[in-house]
Image (tube, helix red, strand yellow):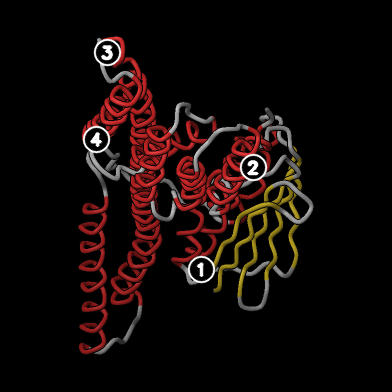
Amino acid sequence: MSTSLRHRLRAWLASPSYPWATGGALTAFAAVELVVVPRHSPVIAVCVLLSAAVLSLRRARPATAALSASAVLVGFAAGSGLYVAAAVSGLVACYTLGRHRVAHPALLVGGGSALSLAVNVWHIASWHPRSYSADLLAEWFVLTVAILAAVSTGDAVRAREETQRERAAAQARVLAMERRQAAEAERASIARELHDVVSHSVSVIAVQAESATYTTPGLSPQAREGFQQIAASARASMAELRRLLGVLRTDGEDRTGTAPQPTLDGLGDLIAQHRSVGGEVELRISGDRVELPTSCELSAYRIVQEGLTNVRRHAPGAHAVVEIDYQPDRLAVRIADDGPGPPGVVRSGHGLVGMQERAVLLGGRLSAGRGRDGGFLVEAEIPW
């Protein structure tokens, strides 16, 4: 059986029309069987039809399956033979009672066994009024085993589905937790990078304010004191930034100085690295190159870096195109490839989470998914 056919069958079994279709088909079969098989009483006909028709409600009202099972036993007690439709209806009814846990399985089997024993005793009294032996209880044993098997099967299916739902819920919780942790880690990483950018700017302010008191002739005492206050405030801000970075760092991280943060001027080296490992990439730059804020340059560089990493990981050998468009008030970044694209759903992972966090942090947006011509497409806009 093909995968698509299996999915269609499972979807139909889970649809609301399934109980009505099967119940109606079983009722029609019971009517045909009653016409074909002679010598049946009106009681048997009513019980057989009732047991089959009631099964149409087994999903909406599972407790009505007890009526179907009871009708089968009453019809069996009224006649000398158990019709095929009635037997199937009784087994489906017992399965439904166990599947939906209408009562505890032990109670269902015990009740069914007691009713089966009553039917067996009725038959013994009707057919063998003066002859009693253990062999005459074989009917009760067969009915009890059938009820036990049907109820146990239904209860086992219910337990398996509950286990699957719990496993799916646990996996969803783990995935959500991993995504939260990835987002938090990415925010901390972005904050550390921005710390370096801001610290550099504040240190420049401190140095310039300090040096101005010596390089600018003719400063009044008030101006000199003002420059000293600016330098002192800048040094205090740098100390606060260092304490902030200490909170963001986790145990085991390198606490030495960081390397200069990359900018869009380093895209050439990034493209060369991608090509050096066998990747095909084309860089397209449109608009007038302007000096953007360092945070924008850094975020755009990281988005391109992660986009090319995803191409190497998910579409090795694919041709990638990186487009950088300098617009009047924003920077547009686009990374596309001609690979197979996502298998039905958008690729998820820490990389996409990181790119989205970088864009959102700067007031921009990022989208990722299947491209218009196939492959995978990442589009970001970063205002500046």
Alpha-carbon distance for marks 2 and 4? 37 Å
Residue 107 coordinates in the image, percent (x, y): 21, 36
Alpha-carbon distance for marks 2 and 3? 55 Å
Residue 339 coordinates in the image, percent (x, y): 73, 40
Mark 1 highlights which residue? 293
Residue 76 coordinates in the image, percent (x, y): 41, 32
Alpha-carbon distance for marks 4 and 1? 78 Å
Alpha-carbon distance for marks 4 and 3? 27 Å
Q: Is residue 336 visible?
A: yes
Mark 4 highlights which residue? 111
SS class of the residue under badge 1? Answer: loop
Alpha-carbon distance for marks 1 and 3? 103 Å
Mark 2 highlights which residue? 8
- Does label 1 or label 3 sit earlier along the sequence? 3
- The residue depicted at 35 percent of the width and 28 percent of the height is 147
- The residue depicted at 76 percent of the width and 56 percent of the height is 372
- Depicted 213 relative to depicted 99: above or below: below
Mark number, residue 131: 3
